Image (tube, coloured by chain):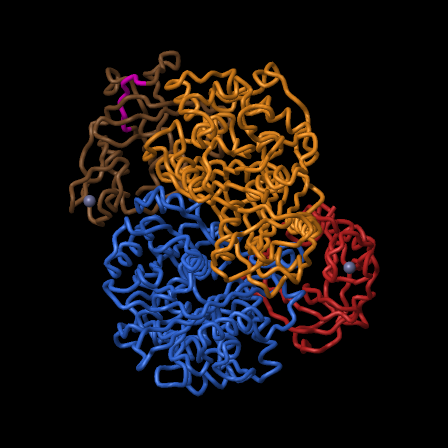
Chain colours: A brown, B red, C blue, D orange
Amino acid sequence: MFKWFGRVNHAPHTKVAEFAQHLREGRLMASRCEACGHVSFPPRADCEACLHGAFTFVPVSGRGTLHTWTRITAAPRGFEDVAPYTLGLVDLEEGGRALAWIGASVPESSLAIGMPLQVTPRLHEDVEDIRVDYTLESPKGATA
Amino acid sequence: MFKWFGRVNHAPHTKVAEFAQHLREGRLMASRCEACGHVSFPPRADCEACLHGAFTFVPVSGRGTLHTWTRITAAPRGFEDVAPYTLGLVDLEEGGRALAWIGASVPESSLAIGMPLQVTPRLHEDVEDIRVDYTLESPKGATA
Amino acid sequence: MSGRVGIVGIGHTPFGRRSDATVQELAAEAFRAALADSGLDRGHMDAVVVGSVPEYHKQRSLPGVVQEYLGLTPKPTWLTEAACASGSAAIRTAWMSIKAGVHDVVAVIGCQKMTELETAEILALMGRVGEVQWESSFGSTFPGYYAMFARRHMHEYGTTREQLTAVAIKNHFYGARNPLAMFRKEITAEKANASEDVATPFHVFDCCANADGAACVILAAEPRARGLRKPPVWLSGMGCASDTMSVLRRPSLTGLGSAQAAAAQAYAMAGVDAKRVRVADVHDCFTIAEVLAYEDLGFCAKGEGGAFIAENRSYIGGSTPVNVDGGLKAKGHPIGATGVSMTTEIVKQLRGDAGERQVPDADVGLTHNVGGIGQYCFVQVLTRDE
Amino acid sequence: MSGRVGIVGIGHTPFGRRSDATVQELAAEAFRAALADSGLDRGHMDAVVVGSVPEYHKQRSLPGVVQEYLGLTPKPTWLTEAACASGSAAIRTAWMSIKAGVHDVVAVIGCQKMTELETAEILALMGRVGEVQWESSFGSTFPGYYAMFARRHMHEYGTTREQLTAVAIKNHFYGARNPLAMFRKEITAEKANASEDVATPFHVFDCCANADGAACVILAAEPRARGLRKPPVWLSGMGCASDTMSVLRRPSLTGLGSAQAAAAQAYAMAGVDAKRVRVADVHDCFTIAEVLAYEDLGFCAKGEGGAFIAENRSYIGGSTPVNVDGGLKAKGHPIGATGVSMTTEIVKQLRGDAGERQVPDADVGLTHNVGGIGQYCFVQVLTRDE
Ligand SMILES: [Zn+2]
Ligand SMILES: [Zn+2]
């Protein structure tokens, strides 16, 4: 089911495929190592701390702050007709980062490194196949 | 103009591009090193004998004998709808080899290693773009 | 450095269709197993060399992804490619880095995920397997090249269709006994000969299959290699050579010049000859390729490869057991992983850990990993301490 | 072997759009020039290591094609890939093979033909330049990553848009003086700033261009390296390190951990520090990348890279002249050729053969070749005999 993830998906086969199912149901999940308890976002099947190979999914808040960003004009295949779009990289409160589009609740003129943002699951129903991803939204508008 | 060469062409840019123009005009050409006189077929811009980088085209007879062959059933992209086809590899009288389709003048049942074959330039006019290549024909039918 | 280089850990995923994992997840399976086998931990790795063929992955520049996933940054890493011999090229590179005194302990990871590509992409790649300027334009294919080798070998030496089939039967016989193999069923001559034509004289059962998988070996300099969990297996003879890309310039189509030259180097370095080899893993991408290997490696005389298999001489109990892990034919051929997989099998044999596939008295082993249609060949002679 | 490894021959094609040649024809131009430069002939080559990124070529498994075309079969050959640092990975591999005593003389050929691909193919490749599982799915691009680095650097250190432009102006200034460069015209700040947006804050003139080209260096073991046509330039310090593939796991975005670690290794091995470097070729794939390089290599303190270019300190006459061949920015960036090209430039400088671009008293030089967005970095310190 990981082929659901992203506008263009190049990695349909993964041990963390269930992440996409959770996202579809509105949950943002990290992986938690069954051996040492280390939590990773994005999730990993194999622990980054101890390389153990068993994990469970655990929910994360998605709260973070903007680390850096860029507005992409020269877009790759699959993104030509949606450019320009703005990518933000956020540092997450519970560790790890997320790279995603800045969402509609955040005017480009308001972007500032350090500003709080909310990683927000998205189910795109405007397409024939199931497609899920997440956007970076203003915390107050995250549930809108 | 080397993009004319072959049913599918993956190497449009080459210093021996003029080979395709000669082929179009019915001439099968080898390269001749301007330094040492070594003749190569297929042509090379840089001499295989001395690595000198200047050459001229010289005609070759295209007479040869069958070294080995195979009938391809599982075809790659661009050849799906013309399979099966039979590839022959011939040792040329003047040195070098040619790999090409066995032509219509040679019944598959007659194929035998060592049999004489004639490398025969072909201009394909059944397509919109110019396309040239060569086939391996029975010597007596080569000019038919 | 004048000391030897030993293999101190091996790991190997199941080969086959792995629709459950990314390529880095496969790499982690093999690496974790090799670490456990060696008793070393991640921090001991001085570098990682990745053997893989980039065209098959959507993920570009694999070493970076693997290195991050295994948690090995900022240690050096890079990829080696030599077509189907990329795994052995990686081992050779790691071996040189240790011989040079640059590194002490190096992990080599061969990995490939081939089944993610769509049919159209595979057909496009297949169409560019040969020399693209003068050959691919006529629709040459990978099986087609080896089929032309086979027909010429049949012509010159009287090799038969039945002898080719016997190679497939043997390798599936052993594949059925290898829990890591993709195909684990024995086959009959009837089944093989009834399979679809690919490129005459080849049927489907003359050809190995695309697969996903990873294999890992950990190499260490001699002093470091001792006192670990298992006794080291030594890389005692290392050969590497090339032959032409195209069949248009290839001196002979009934043997691989690269394999003959690489074998001569490896035997000379190890101080052994072909008769001393007790077990070998050779590159049977097509049935004829194993026949050529018997001859190129000197297991039999030139032209006698067909008789060699017909007389069961490459079975356990024969003069030189070959591909008793199933070979590429039954194990599957995840390109970059294949060479590393060969080495893990010979290490198992030399350790006496090969179970029902164990070759008795296997103290000298050999791997023969061919790139493309013989453009590259890497030969390793492996030995153990008495 | 404890002796040094020297560069005894260099060759370099013009970089740019080479619609007249196949990739092996480009390789032959560079190899022939390097042979002539060294006075050696083909028969002296013990092996060839090819540095290239396979995805850009229709021809698969380049070493086989190059080896045949150069007439070097059956000598060993294979390819190394480390994204944009593939050329330096090849040099490092060749250096190790000589240090190991495996080979005496090795040719390294960096080559890439990028302009044969159609726009659709380039867009598809561009879309997979990052980590594909978590990043490419959002439309990340190569300029986009470095643009994010730039914005963060501006935020933390006050680096300015004008300072980035100053890097481009310098490199085009020198490119105009390099007959092998793709772009041979000086540019103004007005022209650079008026160029199209790519990924804010980058315009087109912040980015290097795809190109075709090849470069070759011939390496030899110390005794062999002496007495040839030119005095050898020594590979005195060799560093190699990695950083994470993804920006999601990257500790810092205002410097490349791989470059810092590789530089430390190279300086330590050569026994020099950053101040001793008289001339450097660094990996300016984007303007910010050169600023990061100043800092990562220790040419200036952390955060002072912007001032370093603003004060002209990387021009000839400044404290450390950088990319006086035009850099990737003006020379063009035929990926696999780039690292090898850097080494040829530093060899020219240390020989005193750089013409109007000659840095006075250039006796210690450095190359800094980055793969991808810092996944790999290879640093070489080169020296000459007094
Ligand atoms: Zn853990
Ligand atoms: Zn000549």
Check residue D368 for magenta coloring.
no
Q: Nearer the viewer, residue C31 or B51?
A: B51
Q: Nearer the viewer, residue C343 or C106?
A: C106
Q: Residue most toward the front? A: D386
Q: Which residues are magenta?
A: A114-121
Looking at the picture, does residue A36 appear above or below residue C84?
A: above
Residue D27 in percent (x, y) is at: 65, 49
Q: Is residue C155 left or right of residue C85?
A: right
Q: Main secondary structure of the magenta part?
A: strand
The quadrant of the image that shows the C terminus of chain C is: bottom left
- Residue D25, visible in the rendered structure: no
The quadrant of the image that shows the N terminus of chain C is: bottom left
Check residue A116 for magenta coloring.
yes
Q: Nearer the viewer, residue C1 or C301?
A: C1
Q: Residue at x 39, y 12 (%)?
A: A109
Q: Is residue B109 left or right of residue A55?
A: right
- Residue D272, visible in the rendered structure: yes
Looking at the picture, does residue D165 appear above or below residue C86?
A: above
Residue C66 in percent (x, y) is at: 36, 47
Q: Is residue C263 left or right of residue C230?
A: right
Looking at the picture, does residue B61 appear above or below residue D175?
A: below
Q: Nearer the viewer, residue B117 or A126?
A: B117
Residue A116 in percent (x, y) is at: 27, 18
Image quarter where ligand 2 lies: bottom right
Q: Residue at x 49, y 52 (%)?
A: D93
Residue A80 in percent (x, y) is at: 49, 29
